[in-house]
Image: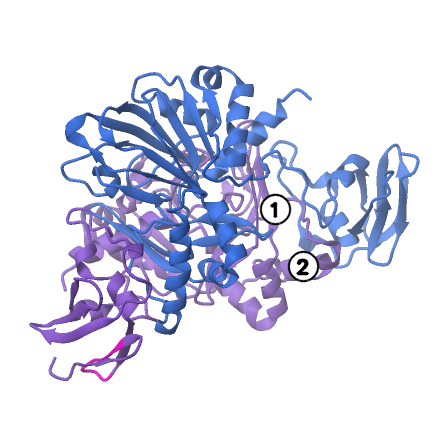
Chain colours: A purple, B blue
């Protein structure tokens, strides 16, 4: 660390690191992050920001024993910052996060990664590899799942606890005599995301195929991010409307009436797409101003049109023992109409939310061999 | 309905209602909402928007038997709209929603509404009245709760199923020898919202007081909306920074590592505030650009300062048998330091999310006598 240099400025300390990079550390930020402020057991912040003046200034700054030692003016307080903490925390950059796995868009020719149920159940490395594929592509298949209800959700629970919804903690996708949802019929289900009518639609979805003997019922998938980015490039105004105009989504039956207004596309801080809500069969009656409607319908149709194009859509037939897992806020899923009189079709489904998913990635990274 | 008049325009039908108001119904919107498109059982939309041309036009429009009958040009299709449907669905306005109860801001002199546990358990009207107070004020107390663990969460479950988090489905607020969270110590807990480190912090929180014999430990509450609106009026730039600059929130222990970047204030579509994330003890190290920090800290301190002012904060001592319920994304809560050697203090807590809350309001409104 011989070439580490600090410069005491008017409002901030400038640090020059051995690799030549510079970080700027405002004094108020340094004072707020004095390492002495964490609760010894909970590691939560005990410091009261209002206990110090709004503009703390250093009286003395020194480098000693690998620590940056700041003695504050006007108060009896000394802060000792480990250099590796300062190297990890540089204003203007987010610290590395093992849950931050870049998404790679895919199209209709995507080869879905396959993983093995037994390995995921017994080995954290196999779990991490499956989750990394899910984070990257938003779609993966697990083979060799035991032929029993609960075998699929046991795999999902390796990631985190299940997200309960008005359909329960788990759900059975079968054709029912008295359906409250198109999934529970034998109808064609166009590509969609589940539960866009929720404040936060479920993060990841898991569908374990227990039986698929009926004619028809092939599964279809498309990467909503690839579709949205294609639309952004081809028609920026349509993309903008889908990002900004809230539309109503609603599900209601005897037990629930869950509704929100949200845009189809929700951007993230970095200019990408945080989540997609696309589900033509539970979209409500559009209620934007009349003068917006012609343009909005054009934009919506432009997105919808892409969900029917072979360049974006892949289809496959799930076999008993397969479980498909996908990012429900990114990957659109659907199925062809099937013929319940020709055989039984049964998927067992559940959800795990994004928060639990990311938490597990961080925990797995703690124990990963370097 | 004698003075109902429709005018066939180039792109839209104009409707003049008996009260003189006018609604504009673009043809593409009318065609998309033809009442024949709903699944008979699920009431979900079966219509494929791409099955019609992008610009449908009427060949003939007539009023017959209280229905607006539109015969479409170029396709063999007739749509029959009930007038009351058209009256409820007017482009540019959202249909009335029983869950949309206006929030009324309050300050430190607020008299918290009280409700009765037995009534809520047995009577839907009492349940609706309690929920209306919670929606309006974000804070209410239920008295007469049975002296047993689970009596409070049974009241919460009258609203909807409980939100599970990394702390469980329910949680016990007691001083513990090995806490993973400041709530589980005897420390002073400054005003905060719970779990801002989650993608969606829990909607409503319920704390049932089973014992409160320790010295200290008074409960404190403040209306985060009142504070935010006061800040908006006094310092619009500070308000803007709190609405737009994401800051890190993180909780991590042996079992979980849950983190997001989000602004303290999340605006809603109408210019109000959808949710507040304010929790100084699990805010992480700020990582916005250095040149933003001085202004951001000033804005953050301006919010924080208000959370200490008597004009905003009320305090009270919960008695055994009381349950406090509050909107966790609006109402800040805290407690004074208590002295565990002087007596036992025990709160039993749980959460119900906003989606379930609003769903229950809609279901209750279905059965309400007119």
How far apart marks 2 and 1 lie (CA) works out to 13 Å
Say if the magenta span includes residue B4.
no
Q: Which stretch appears magenta?
A: A13-20
**Residue beneath disc 2:** A296
Q: Quadrant of residue A110?
A: bottom left
Q: Nearer the viewer, residue B184 or B253?
A: B184
Determine the chain carrying the residue at label 2: A
Q: Earlier in the sequence, mark 2 or mark 1?
A: 1
In the picture, measured across the screen, residue B342 lies left or right of residue A200, that is left
Mark 1 and mark 2 in contact (Cβ < 8 Å)? no
**Residue beneath disc 1:** A248
Determine the chain carrying the residue at label 1: A
Is any part of residue A256 visible from this angle?
Answer: no
Q: Position of residue A11 (x, y in %)?
A: 31, 75
Say if the magenta span includes residue A15.
yes
Q: Residue furthest front?
A: A74
């Amino acid at each position: 660390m011989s070439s580490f240099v600090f410069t005491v400025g008017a409002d901030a300390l400038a640090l020059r690191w051995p690799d030549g990079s510079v970080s700027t550390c405002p004094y108020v930020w340094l004072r707020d992050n004095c390492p002495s402020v964490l609760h010894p057991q909970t590691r939560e912040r005990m410091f009261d920001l209002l206990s110090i003046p709004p503009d703390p200034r250093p009286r003395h700054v020194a480098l000693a024993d690998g620590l940056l030692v700041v003695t504050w003016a006007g108060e009896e307080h000394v802060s000792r910052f480990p250099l590796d903490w300062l190297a990890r925390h540089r204003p203007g950059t987010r610290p590395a996060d093992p849950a931050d796995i870049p998404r790679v868009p895919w199209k209709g020719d995507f080869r879905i990664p396959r993983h093995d149920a037994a390995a995921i159940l017994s080995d954290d490395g196999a779990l991490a590899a499956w989750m990394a594929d899910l984070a990257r592509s938003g779609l993966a298949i697990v083979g060799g799942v035991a032929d029993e209800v609960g075998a699929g959700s046991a795999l999902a629970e390796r990631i985190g606890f299940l997200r309960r919804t008005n359909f329960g903690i788990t759900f059975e996708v079968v054709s029912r005599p008295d359906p409250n949802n198109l999934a529970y019929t034998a109808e064609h289900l166009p590509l969609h995301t589940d539960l866009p009518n929720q404040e936060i639609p479920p993060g990841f979805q898991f569908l374990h195929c227990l039986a698929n003997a009926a004619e028809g019922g092939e599964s279809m998938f498309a990467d909503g991010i690839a579709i949205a980015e294609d639309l952004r490039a081809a028609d920026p105004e349509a993309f903008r409307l889908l990002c900004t105009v809230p539309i109503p989504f609603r599900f209601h039956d005897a037990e629930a009436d869950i509704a929100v207004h949200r845009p189809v596309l929700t951007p993230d801080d970095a200019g990408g797409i945080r989540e997609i809500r696309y589900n033509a069969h539970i979209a409500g009656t559009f209620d934007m101003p009349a003068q917006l409607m012609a343009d909005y319908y054009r934009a919506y149709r432009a997105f919808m049109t892409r969900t029917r194009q072979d360049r974006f859509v892949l289809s496959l037939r799930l076999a008993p023992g397969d479980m498909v897992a996908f990012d429900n806020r990114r990957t659109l899923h659907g199925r062809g109409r099937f013929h319940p009189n020709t055989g039984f079709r049964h998927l067992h489904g559940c959800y795990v939310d994004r928060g639990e998913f990311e938490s597990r990635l961080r925990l797995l990274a703690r124990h990963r061999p370097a």
